């Protein structure tokens, strides 16, 4: 052992090698092979470990972090802080699995709780910030509201924990304060020398405040930017998009990147008065006409026979997707980008409702109406959206022009919140809940009274029909989050187990009672949560 105790500086490596190969193949220095070799190896390793620890030089002390920024917002009421701790503790997977029973899904209520707390301007309790950031790390949909609630302390913590680095990426400038609008030198310096995330945040902030200044900033360095960066910067022009942006976007139509050209064309087509929109109106109008030689006026379509360079420059993608005809592909893009205001004049002065009602020859109806749907969404034209949606009670659940539930949901998004809720309520009253899930997703929260009543009535009808409630679990989950808490009293009668008819699924009544109990419990909990967040404000008013 004396020889081992005074081993050379590389003795540790020798010991590790012996341990890896085994003492039968390689004995440690100064030890004879034999049955005692493994014990000698362990003794030598123990001695060397003590030597290494004793000889360890202290590392240079790290710089102490700066104190956390002060949060001047008012603190949460005590009851609301306790509620937040409960919501954050209810993580996915912490339950026992299986049926949900009557207990509310607390984690699904967290987004609504955060929205209310942010609207009231409360500060996050410091002791709950780690749990809040962990929750936001696992759910990207929580991040904007969670980081807004956490405030500047989120970025302070994110610099100390790599697991929370998403806060640096999601926060404007990665937590770096943006220069004030009056600091032109600071703005220019950050724009020219900042990191990409900082530059995006700067451009977005300026665009929201002064659209022209943001455009000028982008113009100054546009020619030297990378293609992927140009695409991201160009996308920021959606905020405050107006006619003054047209010259810059027209130049972007000649960009060397196809994606940049396509985005510029999309933005220009959203400006009905742009030169590109006028060109698309001519092209699209040349493809569509009314034939008066038949028994009733009929729309006829003559799709383009080629995609010329001018069309490609204006954003038309020449290569059709697999399984799609080239002519219909080009035609759809032209109509989608043409201003909707051109069609009444082109089609005999008819209103959008009258145009949509016209028959379309040669099976072009779906293609034409689908393109008009996309145009209505892009141009935010509520009049055309109403025409394409049709009446909610129409026999054809898809409406006269919508080709899918997703298309209908996008058309509904162009309408005001009240009109949207009334339309979906009438749709559910006629067609039930089987196709309503996506439509409900675009309605404001809490649901307006007519929509809430329509959903509850449809669930009640489904219960009476004897089906199982998990067939409607998606709608039930939406109801728990979106139904007005004031509806809880009206639902109490549905919590009892109903008598099961002969055609009912076995045990369905009990499952429905359980589902309605959970719904009522959740609504009452949401009402309590809202009241807890109002306490401090009421005291301040007193």
Image (cartoon, rainbow, N blue to C red):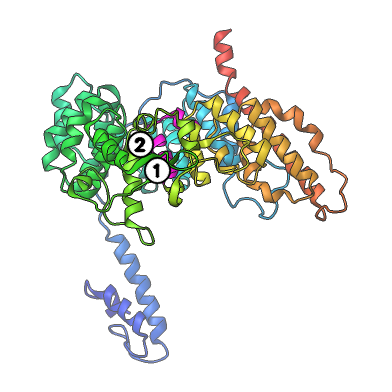
> In the image as oriented, which residue stretches furthest toward the top?
542
Is residue 504 shown left or right of residue 403?
A: right
- How many marks overall? 2
Q: Can I make out residue 473 in this image?
A: yes
Most common secondary structure along the magenta stretch: helix
**Which residue is tagged 2?**
155
Is residue 271 shown left or right of residue 291?
A: left
Name the residue: 22% across, 71% down: 9
The image position of residue 445, as x and y in percent, is 56, 30
The image position of residue 483, as x and y in percent, is 64, 32
What is the secondary structure assignment of the residue under circle 1? helix
Q: Are marks 2 and 1 in contact (CB under 8 Å)?
A: no
Question: Which quadrant would the C terminus be assigned to in this image?
Answer: top right
Residue 385 colored in magenta in the image? yes
Q: Residues within 10 Å of mark 2 (few under 14, many from 20)?
A: many
The image position of residue 324, as x and y in percent, is 37, 58
Magenta span = 368-386
């Amino acid at each position: 052992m004396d020889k081992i105790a005074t081993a050379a500086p590389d003795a540790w490596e020798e010991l590790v090698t012996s341990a890896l190969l085994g003492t039968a193949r390689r004995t440690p220095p100064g030890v004879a092979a034999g049955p005692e070799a493994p014990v000698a190896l362990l003794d030598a390793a123990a001695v060397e470990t003590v030597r290494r620890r004793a000889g360890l030089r202290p590392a240079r002390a790290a710089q102490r972090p700066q104190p956390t920024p002060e949060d001047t917002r008012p603190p949460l009421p005590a009851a609301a802080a306790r509620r937040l701790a409960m919501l954050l503790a209810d993580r996915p997977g912490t339950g026992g699995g299986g049926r949900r029973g009557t207990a509310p899904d607390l984690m699904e209520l967290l987004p609504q709780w955060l929205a209310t707390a942010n609207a009231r301007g409360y500060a996050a309790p410091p002791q709950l910030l780690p749990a809040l950031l962990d929750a936001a790390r696992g759910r990207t949909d929580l991040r904007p509201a969670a980081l807004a609630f956490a405030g500047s302390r989120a970025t302070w913590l994110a610099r100390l924990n790599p697991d929370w680095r998403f806060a640096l990426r999601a926060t404007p400038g990665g937590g770096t304060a943006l220069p004030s609008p009056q600091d032109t030198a600071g703005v220019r310096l950050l724009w020219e020398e900042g990191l990409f995330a900082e530059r995006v945040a700067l451009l977005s902030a300026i665009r929201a405040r002064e659209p022209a200044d943001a455009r000028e900033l982008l113009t100054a360095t546009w020619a030297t930017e990378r293609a992927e960066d140009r695409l991201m910067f160009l996308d920021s022009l959606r905020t405050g998009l107006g006619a003054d942006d047209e010259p810059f976007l027209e130049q972007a139509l000649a960009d060397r990147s196809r994606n940049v050209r396509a985005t510029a064309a999309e933005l220009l087509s959203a400006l009905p008065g742009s030169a590109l929109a006028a060109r698309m109106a001519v092209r699209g109008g040349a493809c569509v006409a009314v034939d008066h030689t038949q028994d009733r006026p009929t729309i006829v379509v003559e799709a383009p026979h080629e995609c010329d360079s001018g069309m490609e420059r204006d954003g038309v993608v020449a290569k059709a997707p697999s399984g799609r005809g080239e002519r219909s592909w080009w035609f759809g893009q032209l109509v989608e980008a043409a201003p909707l205001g051109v069609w009444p004049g082109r089609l005999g002065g008819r209103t959008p409702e009258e145009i949509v009602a016209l028959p379309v020859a040669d099976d072009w109806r779906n293609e034409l109406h689908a393109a008009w749907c996309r145009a209505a969404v892009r141009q935010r034209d509520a009049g055309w959206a109403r025409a394409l949606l049709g009446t909610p009670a129409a026999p054809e659940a898809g409406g006269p022009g919508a080709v899918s539930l997703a298309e209908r949901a996008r058309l509904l998004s162009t309408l005001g919140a009240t009109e949207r809720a009334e339309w979906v309520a009438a749709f559910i009253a006629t067609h039930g809940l089987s196709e309503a899930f996506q439509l409900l997703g675009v309605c404001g929260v809490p649901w307006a009274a007519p929509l809430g009543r329509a959903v509850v009535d449809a669930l009640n009808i489904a219960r009476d029909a004897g089906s199982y409630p998990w067939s409607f679990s998606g709608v039930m989950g939406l109801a728990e989050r979106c139904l007005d808490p004031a509806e809880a009293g009206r639902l109490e009668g549905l919590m009892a187990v109903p008598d099961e008819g002969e055609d009912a699924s076995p045990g369905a009544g009990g499952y429905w009672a359980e589902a309605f109990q959970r719904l009522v419990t959740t609504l009452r909990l949401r009402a309590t949560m809202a009241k807890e967040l109002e306490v401090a404000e009421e005291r301040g008013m007193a």
